[in-house]
Image (spheres, rainbow, N blue to C red):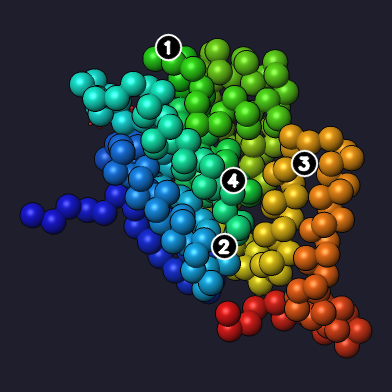
Amino acid sequence: MTSEPVILVEHRAGVRTLILNRPDRLNAANDALLLTLTAELEAADADPSVRVVVLTGAGRGFCAGQDLGDVSGRDMTFTEHLHRTYNPLIRTIRGLGKPVITAVNGVAAGAGASLALSGDLRLWAESALLIEVFSNIALVPDSGSTWFLPRLVGYHRAFELMALAERVNAEEGLRLGLCEHVYPDATFREEVQAYAERLAARPAHALKLTKQALNAALTSTLDEALDREAELQQLAGDHWEHEEGVTAFRQKRPPQFVRGE
Ligand code: T3D
C-alpha cells in the first residue's frame, strides 16, 4: 500500500515550493511531517538551483499545529519532542541561506501559527487565519511564537492573542504586520509564485548576507550591528553580483543576477 507523501515538493523558475500535505487534518503536524519538512529545507539550502523557498499547505488549511492524535501515549517528554522536531525546523528556516516565504493559505494554529510567522516574508490568502491556540489546550506558545509575536505586535497585544486564543483574520493580520501582502484565495498560488519569482531574480548572495545581518541584529547592540555590517559588506562587495549591479547601472540596463550556478 502506498501512502501520500507528507510533504509535496514542486520546483519552478528557481522557486522550491514545499507543501504540507495532510489536508484532512488541516496539515496538523506529526513527526514524519516535521522531520521531512526540515530535511527538505536542508536539501533546498544545499541545491544551487533553489533561490527562494515557499512553504504552504494543501487543502483549506496551512497548518493546525501539533497533531493532537499523536500526543497521547508518546514515548517522549514535551521538552524532548520540541528539541527533536519543532525547534530544529524553526532554526533551519531562520538560518536558511535563502529567503523563505510562508504562504498562509488557510488556518495557521498553534505551532502552525509559529511556522506562519517564521518566514522571512509572509503572504496570506484572504481566508488565512492565525490563532495562538495553545491556551485552548492549556499549553504555552512554542516553536518561536513567544519570540516572533511580541516583536511584531508588542508584549501586550501578544499576550492578549495568546491568552484569549483570538482569531486574527487576513485584514487584521495585515494591519498588525503579521503578513506583508494578502491575495484573493482564487489566485493565491499564482500570486505567491509570481512574488517568489520576483524575489528569485534578486541577488541571492547579497540577500543571504542581508538575512544573516538582520537576524543577528535582532539580538545585538547597535555597535555590534555596525561592525557586522562592515564585515558582511566586504563579502558582498567582493562578489560578482556587486560588479554586475554597478555595471548594469552604468549601462542603463536591468542587472542580471541569475547565472548558471
Ligand atoms: O511537542 C508537543 O507536542 C507540544 C507542541 C505543541 C504545539 C502545538 O501546536 S499545540 C496546538 C495544537 N493544535 C490545536 O490545538 C488546534 C486544534 N484545532 C482547532 O482548534 C481547529 O481544528 C482549527 C481552529 C485549527 C480549525 O477549525 P475548523 O472548524 O476550521 O476545522 P475542524 O473541523 O476543527 O478540523 C478539521 C479536521 O481537522 C477535523 O477532523 P475531522 O473531524 O474532520 O475528522 C479535526 O479534528 C482535524 N484537526 C484539526 N486540527 C487538528 C486536527 N487533528 C489533529 N490535530 C490537530 N491539531
Residue at the spot of label 4: 94
Circle 3 SS class: helix
Q: Which of marks 3 and 2 is nearer the N terminus?
A: 2
- Please name the amino acid that badge 2 sits on: Val
Residue 44 % position (x, y)? 48, 62
Residue 66 seen by the camera: yes
Residue at the spot of label 1: 138
Q: Quadrant of residue 79?
A: top left
- Residue 135 higher or lower than 111, as above or below: above
Q: Nearer the viewer, residue 241 or 160?
A: 241
Residue at the spot of label 3: 217
Query: How much space separates mark 4 and mark 1, taking CA atoms?
Result: 27 Å
Q: Image quadrant for the C terminus?
A: bottom right
- Please name the amino acid that badge 4 sits on: Arg
Q: Which of marks 3 and 1 is nearer the N terminus?
A: 1
Q: Which of 172 and 39 is in front in this view?
A: 39
Circle 2 SS class: strand
Q: Earlier in the sequence, mark 1 or mark 2?
A: 2
- Please name the amino acid that badge 3 sits on: Ala
* Mark 3 and mark 1 residues within 8 Å of each other at the beta carbon: no
Front: mark 4 or 1: 4
Residue 221 % position (x, y)? 84, 35
Circle 4 SS class: helix
What residue lies at 54% left-to-right and 42% top-to-bottom?
91
The label number, if any, that marks residue 163 in the structure image: none
Q: Image quadrant for the N terminus?
A: bottom left
Query: How much space separates mark 3 and mark 2, taking CA atoms?
Result: 22 Å
Residue 130 % position (x, y)? 52, 32
Front: mark 3 or 1: 3
Residue at the spot of label 2: 52
- Residue 177 higher or lower than 234, as above or below: above
